[in-house]
Image (spheres, grey):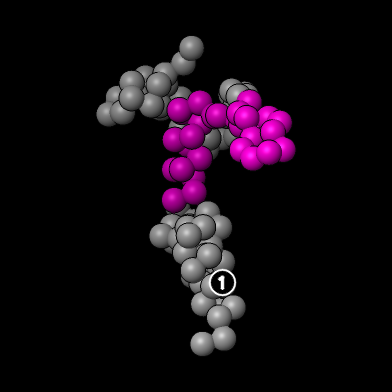
Amino acid sequence: MGRSVRGAAGARAPEGPAIGTQLLEGPYRPRPVLRVELPKAGAGGGMRALGIPTVLDRFIQQAVLQVPQPSWDPTFSDASFGFRPGRSGFAARRSSSRLASPF
């Protein structure tokens, strides 16, 4: 198995410079995700597929996201809550409850 999050914390990846070059030049390819099935909650049952990326790929996803996000975020609607810093499903529910309330 690969590196764990705990094992990767604070460590420097020996492949770091090579991965940086691959990202900039284009040949980098993420590893396949680990597919895990979880039982669905509720009476319907069934299973739900969950894809878990490698620690390195998740790190790269976050690094790439954090560069443009400060520029993009102000352009989103105030009513948009999905996958935004400082926003949550709970905040969306509170907001919609306030809008639906007559007083």
Residue 64, above or below 68: above
Rendered residue at 49%/49% (across/down): 65
Residue tagged 1: 96
Farthest residue toward the left?
Answer: 10
Check if residue 64 falls in the magenta segment: yes
Rendered residue at 56%/35% (across/down): 25
Residue 90, above or below 22: below
Rendered residue at 69%/33% (across/down): 45
Residue 85 in the image: x percent, y percent?
Answer: 43, 57
Q: Dot 1: what SS? A: helix
In the displayed structure image, the side of residue 14 where residue 34 appears, left or right: right
**Residue 12 found in image quarter:** top left
In the displayed structure image, the side of residue 85 where residue 28 appears, left or right: right
Q: Which residues are magenta?
A: 37-66
Residue 80 in the image: x percent, y percent?
Answer: 56, 66
In the displayed structure image, the side of residue 24 where residue 51 appears, left or right: right
Q: Amino acid at mark 1?
A: Ser
Rendered residue at 33%/21% (across/down): 7
